[in-house]
Image (tube, rainbow, N blue to C red):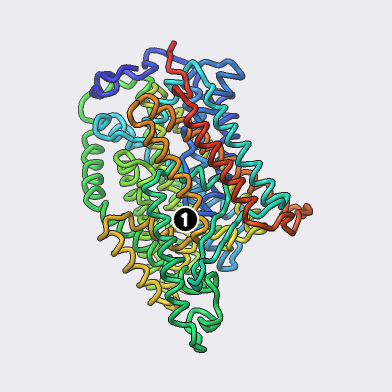
Amino acid sequence: MQDSKRNSTPSTFVPYVPASKSMAELTAFAIVLGIVLAVVFAAANAYLGLKIGLTVSASIPAAVISLGVLRGIFRRKSILENNIVQTMTTAGEAVAAGAIFTLPALYMWGHIPSMATISFIVLVGGFLGVAMMVPLRRLLIVNEHATLPYPEGTACAEVLMSGDTGGKSAKMVVYGFLIGGAVKAMGDGFKWFRTEIESTIFRFKNAVVGMDIFPALLGVGYIIGPRIAGQMLAGGVLAWLVIIPVIGFIGAGSIAVVIPSASPIGELDAWGIWSDYIRYIGAGAVAAGGLITLVKTLPMLFSSLAATLRGLQNKNSGKVTLDRTNYDIPGIWVFSMIAVLIVIIAFAPLTDVGIVGALAIAIFGFLFVTVASRIVGLVGSSSSPVSGMTIATLLVVTFVFKVTGMTGMSGMIASLTVGAIVCVALAVSGDISQDLKTGYLVGGTPWKQQIAMMIGVLVSGLVIGFILSVLNESYGLGSEDLPAPKAVLMRIIVEGIMAGNLPWELIFIGAASAVVFELLGLNSLTVAVGIYLPIHVSTPIMTGGVVRWFIEKISRKDGEMLKARVETGTLLASGLIAGESLIGVIIAVLIWMNVDIPGSILIENNWLPFLIFLLVTIILTWSTLASKKSPVSHSQE
């Protein structure tokens, strides 16, 4: 596809597969593979998000796997089938993100939701996210093609087009999958070695450094890059080498109990101080960072909303001829779906949010879906302030419920339910925006992509409840194994407004810290996540970031080689994440089924796990450097 065609106006733009050409698209092959990958990446991202509070994009790995399976194994040569597969796969990723950022708070309250309740919340949120974005497609994707780049969507289109005659790059994902899965199985499955190493610092009381030797965290660091990884590690260093030792030093000789801890500070070790104090500071920092991110995007928010409304008012002016590449699900069906979903939410006994909650979902859903769909077009899905918009929704809704007399546990559950539905809608709308951009570039049929996204939402929504239930029974949501940082934050916000019994001083210290980070020019939300999570998580992520920095530094003189190496590393890193995360889910299922899992570590030392992690790091670096050309063929038919 020529660059001139990509940068042309909507009236002259010609996609990779022109509208005059029809190819196999929403086929049984694509649907079945899409369903499988949607479930796989939903499970993987659920585990990863509960572990570190971040999820990773599934679009490029899904595109590569679909090329390898459909083209490499079944010899099918339709790029549009591959586009359908990646569209359905991202639905699983988005559903998992919206669910794990909010719903684990219910488990922490001891209110274990049924799988039917979880599926209902996720499905209505996911369907609203798709339906509310459909009317915006022509305005955001077509009319503003030259001004809204949609980074992930464009990158995925490049992978699909450059791999249209290949598919060999799927091997990198498979290699990563096997390595990540093997390390997770040997460490947390068979318990042959420890998966966490830790050391104190000589004559530095309560100062601890450590590392979780998980390949997934290495992969996350490579994908997000050294800047974001470094800021996350900065938060960890601040917490574990500054704040914890300071608290321990000041309270060393005190026998008084300082709330919220139940023990004197002098009796607490580093982990005790982190659990009783630092997590509240980190939660305050994360909340403030999310709101700061939202405030920073307010000008874009208002301008985006105004531009979108103007576009909707004018979209029917003039005669429009619809062809295959410009045909959405009919508006009557879309708006009818939205209306029916809102009515169902208002009266459904599964959620019990009432008319007030349903109206809040309709208002905040439309407002923030519109904003999210446009913002991801400018800065990408990873920079979209989904957390900030969800926090804003929770603040308003929880206050309204409290004022209207819905208090206590019922009010908290209703507030969180509204926030969860909006969060899922935002995550799904951002992902389908990127998918529709990919489809626009490669020549997909919009209504078929929209149907595919709904199928992906349906399948993922039906299994995410089971995944959460198994993970909770096996590890415990909110535990050290799966801390669920974003969900803890949502829980703290709702509890604070309803009950007012939180250690607000610690929350405000964290919020003030986030302001300081912003004044220093840092991403306050990223640093805040580093404070909230143990430094053991940030360290391997930083290692992955260093690998990415090293690759870019030694390859910067050759643009083609740099692109090829970064692409290769991204695919291998995605495999590491998927492999380890899925084995983690499988281990949880085995525990849930009462399968006998070893309870003690076979080899108790720090050196073996360190050497294993070092070996995986070397493999990632060497495999990336070995790439002399793009892992997907650039020849075209």
Q: Is residue 385 left or right of residue 352?
A: left
Quadrant of the frame with the C terminus: top left
Q: Is residue 276 above or below residue 85?
A: below
Which of these two is toward me, 315 or 122?
Answer: 122
Residue 65 horizontal side relative to residue 387, left or right: right
In which quarter of the view is residue 503 placed?
A: bottom left
| Image coordinates for residue 199, horizontal then vertical, percent | 56, 63
Q: Position of residue 487 (x, y in %)?
A: 49, 60
Residue 150 higher or lower than 400, as above or below: above
Residue 614 is situated, as x and y percent measured from the top left of the image, at 56, 45
The answer to whether residue 588 is visible is: no
Q: Secondary structure at mark 1?
A: helix
Kindly identify the residue that appears in the image at 50 percent across and 86 percent down.
257
Name the residue at 51% across, 81% down. 265
Residue 622 visible (yes or no) = yes
* Quadrant occupied by the N terminus: top left
Left or right: where 125 falls relative to 317: right
The furthest residue to the top: 637
Task: Give percent across and percent down for residue 116.
Answer: 60, 52
Query: Is residue 469 or residue 404 the one in the foreground?
Result: 469
Query: Callout 1, which amino acid?
Result: Ala
Q: Residue at x 62, y 61 (%)?
A: 476
Which of 506 and 139 lies nearest the eye of the viewer? 506
Q: Return the residue at label 1.
A: 420
Residue 225 placement, left or right of 466: left
